[in-house]
Image: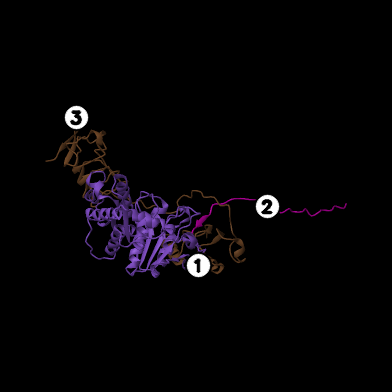
Amino acid sequence: MAKVLVVTSGKGGVGKTTSTAALGGALAQQGQKVVVVDFDVGLRNLDLIMGAERRVVFDLINVTQGVAKLSQALIRDKRLENLWLLPASQTRDKDALTEDGVRDVIAELRTKFDWVICDSPAGIERGATLAMRYADEAVVVTNPEVSSVRDADRIIGMLDSKTAKAEAGDQIKKHVLITRYDAGRAARGEMLNIDDILEILAIPLLGIVPESQDVLKASNVGCPVTLNNAASPPARAYSDAARRLGGETVAMVTPSEVRRSLMGRLLGRRAA
Amino acid sequence: MDAKVEPQRQLMRLRGRSYVAFVFSPFMPIVDWLAEIDATLSNSPGFFAGRPIVIDLAGVELSPHGIAHLVSSLESRGVRVLGLEGVEAGALDASLPPVLNGGRGCVVEQVEPRKVEVKPPPPPAPSLLLRAPVRSGQRIVFTEGDVTVLGSVGSGAEIVAGGSIHVYGALRGRAMAGINGNAAARIYCQKIEAELLAIDGYYQTAEDIGDMLRRQPAQAWLDGEVLRITPLN
């Protein structure tokens, strides 16, 4: 039974695309057949993060408009054969997306994959609402600071009212993924701590991804961080999060432990 | 005397004249629509007798055969079709009524017997219960009475109530009670971090709320013309 997952946040720059690629990579590593779908029409990034930008021929808009078949637009990952990308169009804008077109593409992807992961654009307009429209589950990405938490709260409200599931009287399953978490700064009161975020958002925690250079390095080489350096702290956090999405119970790694090991690695590297 | 009477040439004269006709707008499935017509006829037989009828086909897609069948079905019910509308003339054969266009709507009196049904308005609900948190950007307006929230009210959310507001969680957004001039309305919450509190138009913003009260259970009420915020325990 395929699951459609939307990765969303409201605010831009919190790590939606990075998280989409990393969760997609982790689920594929765990043997699932995964497609990551870029809904950021006009400002596409997922192809770069996945390292597939030079292989894009057709895109999501071409498929929704019937110009290309889905099989022509899907790009298979070079590292993992069960990981696929459906890129967005860079030359169009969000108005090119239609509700019926998105519904049909999602329905077709459901028949071919175990996981359909939709990378939502920032904002609360057409692109974001269509990305979440036909989702079964949502990963709400937030950073530990007030503006992104408030935007996440807003997006949760929309997930509960504007999705096809919500309109049918059903509940969409929601998880919060906290990214760019720096335990040291949180301890000094320079960031919201985990409990505050969970109390405000009142949805289950999927994972805590520490702030890390590994994420930046992976982006620069066009590889999901879970595939680029699977042993790195952010990759482990994403991998655990992917297991939790699959229904496994995985103990949450407390950020202080992550931080200590990260610091250890940094110090170790400096000493070497 | 010869008198020649030239036969006077009678010129054919064309005049335009407009008439009022009833327009039928069938919907799909046609069978159901015909059943509606039958129901009208059974209530008042002869309702359409002698009246000109135009069929507007813009809302349905019918083949020429389907249109012919529709016209004959109506004729068998004593409805005479004067013309058709909303369909391409070229698609029809000569046996069908002509296609009309340029019709304008007008008021026809006594189209239907009026059924006057006086429904009593539903009794006003005294309170609104929200079982989920109110999220940022959501606005709840309930001027009829109290609003109770089982959960928190997010930063950037807004609750507007004619009566009191009860929040069983943190109140981080805006709450406006007694909006219709009810000075006795109050705002209660388990944890006060509100952006704005207002009762009957008197308000305080987050800056005015004392630090001593922040994150504590509190209530807001009107003391004359002063909005007071006091701890609940």
The chain carrying label 2 is B
Q: Nearer the viewer, residue A131 or A240?
A: A240
Amino acid type at mark 3: Gly
Contact check, label 1 and label 2, Cβ < 8 Å: no
Q: Nearer the viewer, residue A120 or B139?
A: A120
Element carrying mark 3 = loop
The chain painted purple is A
- CA distance separating discs 1 and 2: 33 Å
Tell me, yes or no, whether the highlighted magenta stretch contains residue B154: no
Q: Nearer the viewer, residue B65 or A139?
A: A139
The outermost residue toward the right is B1
Q: Which residues are magenta?
A: B1-25
Residue with the mark numbered 3:
B224
Placement of B174 over or under A6, stated as above or below: above
Amino acid type at mark 2: Leu
The tint of chain B in the picture is: brown
Placement of A135 over or under B174, stated as above or below: below
A250 relative position to A113: left or right: left
Element carrying mark 1 = helix
Measuring from the top left, give residue B32's x and y in whole percent: 43, 65
Residue with the mark numbered 1:
B73
